[in-house]
Amino acid sequence: MMGSVATSLVTYYSPATALTNYQGLLIISFIVSLLMIYFRAKSIQDISEPERDVRKFTWDNNMEWNNFIALFVASLLLGASVTLIFRFVNIVISQAYSIKVSEIALIMGGDKIVSIIGALCAPLLVKNFPLKPTIIIVGILTALCLYLASYNMPLIIFTSLYFIRLFLNYCLMPLLDTLAITGFAKERMFLSTSIRQLAFYLGSALSAVFYGKLLDEAQWEYTLIISSIFALIGAIFMSFIRVENK
């Protein structure tokens, strides 16, 4: 979060050229990455690897096949929806409002604060409200925010919808993780969480090509509409996952 805010402030207030700012940020990012690798290597020293699991893989529960399919489709669609906000929102804002890159960076710098709030609220939703109705409501609100953002409106309203969409995403994704665990037997939780990640990134990769083509044609409104459809259908498929371990 601090890195995103610092980057936004540098690009907005720095008197240097955009290229100089970019080169400086790349150098700083490289140094920080080396520090991260160093501290991670230090943190895993003296940690022994877990013993190899020699249990045979079995799948004798028909319910889990249905959960597997629903989990894969839900993760695929949610990954496709989130990609627009995470990877292309700067292009969408630029095409819709033609503002400076430094101003766009300042807007995007606030998303980390919103992500923290959303991540903190997600456990409260799981604890205090029924899981599946919560998923449907969050999915509908997510789709609504994306769809409304496709209309011509003042930048402040678009930015508010963008932050609300981010907040809802960080509420929805932990719910998907919860379903990936509770919808499967304990011995298959590793497989289910791996499938969730695989499908999510697959949806992200496929949708990136689609969004890129639309944005090349300056059809940013359609990217938001399509992303809203992905989010809604993904939430519906999430509700199809039956919970086994409560």
Image (cartoon, rainbow, N blue to C red):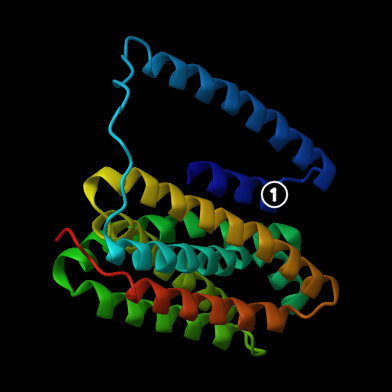
Say which of 26 and 223 sits in front: 223
Determine which residue is flagged by label 1.
11
Which residue is found at the position 38% from the left and 46% from the top? Answer: 191
* 104 shown above or below 42: below
Residue 98, given in percent of the width and then of the height, sits at: 78, 73
Q: Residue at x 28, y 54 (%)?
A: 181
Q: Is residue 193 left or right of residue 215?
A: left
Is 33 displayed left or right of 51 in the figure? right
Say how many tags the image has. 1
Residue 217 location (% of width, % of height): 85, 76
Q: Quadrant of residue 118?
A: bottom left
Image position of 66 with respect to 138: above or below: above
- Name the amino acid type tagged 1: Thr
Mark yes or no: residue 167 visible: no
Residue in the picture at 51% in, 78% down? 161
- In the figure, is residue 157 to the left or right of 52? right
SS category of the residue bearing label 1 = helix
Res 50 quadrant in image: top left
**Along the horizontal axis of the image, is 160 left or right of 225?**
left
Residue 193 appears in the rendering: yes
Q: Which of the image's four quarters has the C terminus? A: bottom left
Measuring from the top left, give residue 231's x and y in whole percent.
50, 75
Does 82 sit above or below residue 228? above
Residue 76 horizontal/vertical position (percent): 53, 64
Q: Residue at x 81, y 70 (%)?
A: 213
Classify 10 Å Cα crowding around label 1: few (below 14), some (14-19), many (20 and above): many
